[in-house]
Image: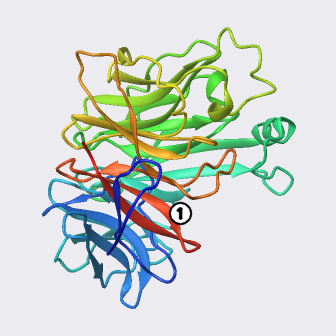
Amino acid sequence: MREWTDSQTGRTVRQLTDLSRGATLGYFRLPRQVPGGLVLAWGRHNGGNVLLLDPESGEAIPKDILVAEFLKLDEATGRMWFLPEPGREVWAVDLPDGSPVLVGSVPQEAPGHLRDITCDGRTVLLNQTTQELATYRIPTTRDAVAVWHYLARPRYGRIWAYDLRSDRLTKLAESIEFSFFHLDASPTDPELVRFAKDMLEGLGQRMWTVRTDGSELRQIRHQEVFEVVTHEFWWPDGEHVAYTYQDRRGDATLYQTPWCEYAPVPTRLGIADLAGGEVYLSDPLNHYHTHLNVSPDGQWVCGEGTDGHCFVHAAPFSWDSTRADLQPLATVHTPYVPFRGQHVEAGFSADARWLLYNDTVDGRFQVCAVRVG
């Protein structure tokens, strides 16, 4: 473990990993808390690519497990479901000290790629996407024409659920205009799935939920045209979905500035219940246009700054106050890429004493931590 004082915030930063190939926290919305106060991270080492981090002691514990596709982690029990190699076999391991076991497989004829699994380990979610990418490159510069060209690519999508016990395959959603992404099974309800449409967030309904039997397809936080709802994630109670919100209904720059991070309107933290209604909307958060996240106890929120304001931030959260006064805790040194961000993936330790995040150290991604409060 290395430590240094951040020259811009005055806080002590810990570098928790130092792998020659780099290390990273997973995508910000995915569960990562392992019993015993450990945090799941990823980095190639001699025995595999799974790491368990202890932000309090600074210890990084390599596990002899090789994961090709991460499906889900049950934070209450430490059970992690994964694919050990590209294919259809689903395995599980009880972290921190268990050994991997085969729990089932998905038939080759089931369409799509395995992306998630329900919290009881019974139903695998598959995402089937057909799209044209050869002439529709993902834009990584501030070129609005390139962004709109990419968003106009031909595509369609389907979401499927495969029940490992009954061998039943069920279609959950289908679109001939868009594909789907951000499949994210509920952390508490084994029959509920949240997903998003792959589209410009201000031009249609972004968030949806559906039951694993294909019933109750429901809009979450109904959007008017030019309302932006994006970067959604489960609230710890499993009864709410949080997201970033921007109101661009009076903004005439949407075509010239389709990026959320450069929009001339503030971002807010929104939270909706599972009936789809918005139950919380914060005051403007100013610069914090990328991922927001919440601590496991729901008492803190964090934010990632954007181009020209590159810090990780944290603030106390209360349902009774619309103010979330995000304060910069540590500088992010990774170059900012439009449309792709900085791969910061900030989130809290189990006790909310530490904010963990990815940063570039000596040319490699490593996992760092800074104390909260």
Q: Is residue 100 left or right of residue 249?
A: left
Residue at (49%, 75%) from the top-left corner?
22
Residue 21 or residue 79, whichever sits in front: 21
Residue at (81%, 27%) from the top-left corner?
256
Q: Position of residue 309 (x, y in %)?
A: 57, 41
Residue at (67%, 44%) from the top-left corner?
339
Q: Which residue is mark 1?
A: 109
Residue 229 or residue 9, whichever sits in front: 9
How crowded pointer 1 is (Cα within 10 Å; few <14, some 14-19, many 20+) is rated as: few
Q: Position of residue 142 (x, y in %)?
A: 79, 41
Residue at (83%, 40%) from the top-left corner?
143
Q: Position of residue 21 (x, y in %)?
A: 52, 80
Amino acid type of disc 1? Glu
Q: Please determine whether, in this image, residue 81 is positioned above or below residue 256.
A: below
Q: Please determine whether, in this image, residue 212 is positioned above or below residue 25.
A: above
Q: Is residue 79 left or right of residue 146?
A: left
Q: Is residue 66 left or right of residue 180?
A: left
Residue 116 visible, this orientation: yes
Residue 265: quadrant of the picture: top right
Q: Please determine whether, in this image, residue 239 is positioned above or below residue 180.
A: above
Residue 216: quadrant of the picture: top left
